[in-house]
Image: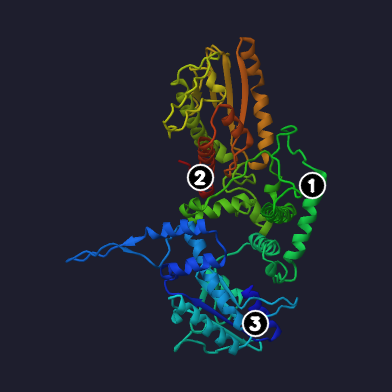
Amino acid sequence: MIWHQIQAAKKEKRDIHVIFLDLANAFGSVPHNLLWESFSFFHVPSIVTNLVKAYFKDLQLCFTTADFTTSWQCLEVGIMAGCTISSLAFTMAMEVIIRASRWVVGGEKTKNGICLPPIRAYMDDMTTLTTTAACTRRLLGKLQENIKWARMTIKPNKSRSISIVKGQLKNVRFCIGDDPIPTVSEQPVKSLGRWYNASLGDKDQVQQESLNWLSQEYNCSKVRLLMTLKDSSDQTISNAVPPLLTGRKWTPSDAVQQVTSALRHSDIVGHVQLGRGGFGLAASKPTWRKASTSERRKMVVEEVRHQEEAERSAKAVSLAKQGQWMRWEGLERRKLSWRELWEMEANNISFIIRATYDVLPSPKNLNQWYGEDPTCDLCPNPANLVGCKTSLTQGRYTCRHNQVLKSLAAALESKRNTINSLPLRTTNSIPALNFIPEGEKRPNYRPIRPETGQLATARDWKMLADLGQQLNFPPEIAVTTLRPDLVLWSPSLKSVYIIELTVPWESSTEEAYELKKLRYTDLAADAQQRGWRAKIYPVEVGCRGFVASSTTRLLKDLGICGQALRQTVRAVSEAAERSSHWIWIKRKDPCWA
């Protein structure tokens, strides 16, 4: 509200005077007698007042020097930091001082005819807002008198003043006693998260905060602020909501109106089932008509964020080159944390971004941009991170494949060893109930969760990985010359899982899945004829580090979930990305080691 009144005064060529006051050690100097007076003023029940008095009566201190130690002294001033009761008591005490001071002047009137209070406070931050310098001096004098009566003081050197006369910032001097208050032109001040300096503009605000606001979060913050002001329980605020200045193309009031209409329409339509999970499996969302005020504010902000995301997606779909990732199917989203970005080298970040949007300076892209020769430096075919025959012959793609396979095999081997080391779980056993005896507390340790997944039904799992072309398919299952990347089987269950890994171009993951599944269909049929339950798991990890849903499905089916699942997905993703980066660096080198 204060920032809006300042901007309105500059725009409408009006006068306004704002003083930011700083109390010296406000929390440590507020008298206890003032607290009890405020309790009486606001009609707090006597039983509560006596309880708080007894609570504060136990505050004592003593001083110790090298020669002597004083006796314990009862404290008559100050509140305890971190105490809930103390913050409420301090707020009531400051409200008594404000109400005893604000009557000497009138507040500024808005266009709606509402008179704004001349004094505002948030805990120990006090701000005065008047229209004339004479009213400001009279209000400061009364406020100083009441604060002095409360045995508290104002620090003039930490306070600041803003004076706008006919829309221009002027150096009008105000004083606390005989000490002058600096202006924001002399010393900028930060109040409630906002900087006030000589320019009084939003551009300098962003420069001082050193923040790069995104359009989406900026719009969400404006919508959240508008909803907070409109839904305020204080009628002075809700009836005088200022127009939030955001520009000509987008306004929060129009956005709130559109989003509110969309949410009401969604109540009429009801819950719509998305995906192939079946009815009732989708996450339920709160309805607009049953939501509380805070829930409605969150729903509006999330809907604005969703609309901004939809606009960006529509823009990406229209881009032929940079928007190819919108046509990827069956791939999981990849998230890069700030920690990962800080740990990456600059060339690695550049490679990830350019490879994702397919704007690397490959021969194909250079031909499109500058008309250069589109053929690969190593073979006559146009190639990028895949498709080079020389790289395939020299084993560059095989090396990348094996690096991803190592990461996947390590996770499955760890899970296999864990399962095999556990005692066999019986199907008819009744779980024991651990009762807590009377007078004892519940133990702090977490209960051990039973293992889940398809591996939990046996303890004799075996695994082979085709690293270095050394895999021979187990002859007791089937006789074949095929070499799948991973074979996981249990002789007791006569169950076998055939896992085949592919590291394709991300747009070809669905095609690679169907080809690999068709390749091992006959092998699975032969194993079933011998009495084995065979299941084929084609899995894909994109050459740019995007993991397919088939990979996460395999890990979940085998009982790898939670943190272990996230770590495995991250490991295989980094392995593919790191290998592709090395292939890109060596794209012009005919030798491969």
Q: Nearer the viewer, mark 3 or mark 1?
A: 3
For label 2, the residue is: 578
Q: Position of residue 244 (x, y in %)?
A: 70, 70
**Front one among 229 and 219:** 229
**Could you tell me which quadrant the N terminus lies in?**
bottom right
Q: Secondary structure at mark 2?
A: helix
Name the colouring of the figure: rainbow
Q: Earlier in the sequence, mark 2 or mark 3?
A: 3
**Mark 2: amino acid:** Arg
Alpha carbon distance from label 2 to label 3: 68 Å
For label 3, the residue is: 106
Identify the residue at horizontal 53%, vertical 21% (top origin). 456
Q: Earlier in the sequence, mark 3 or mark 1?
A: 3
Identify the residue at horizontal 73%, vertical 53% (top origin). 310
Tags 2 and 3 touching, CB below 8 Å: no
Residue 183 visible (yes or no): yes
**Front one among 560 and 302:** 302
**Front one among 46 and 460:** 46
Identify the residue at horizontal 46%, vertical 56% (top origin). 51
**Could you tell me which quadrant the C terminus lies in?**
top left
**Mark 3: amino acid:** Gly
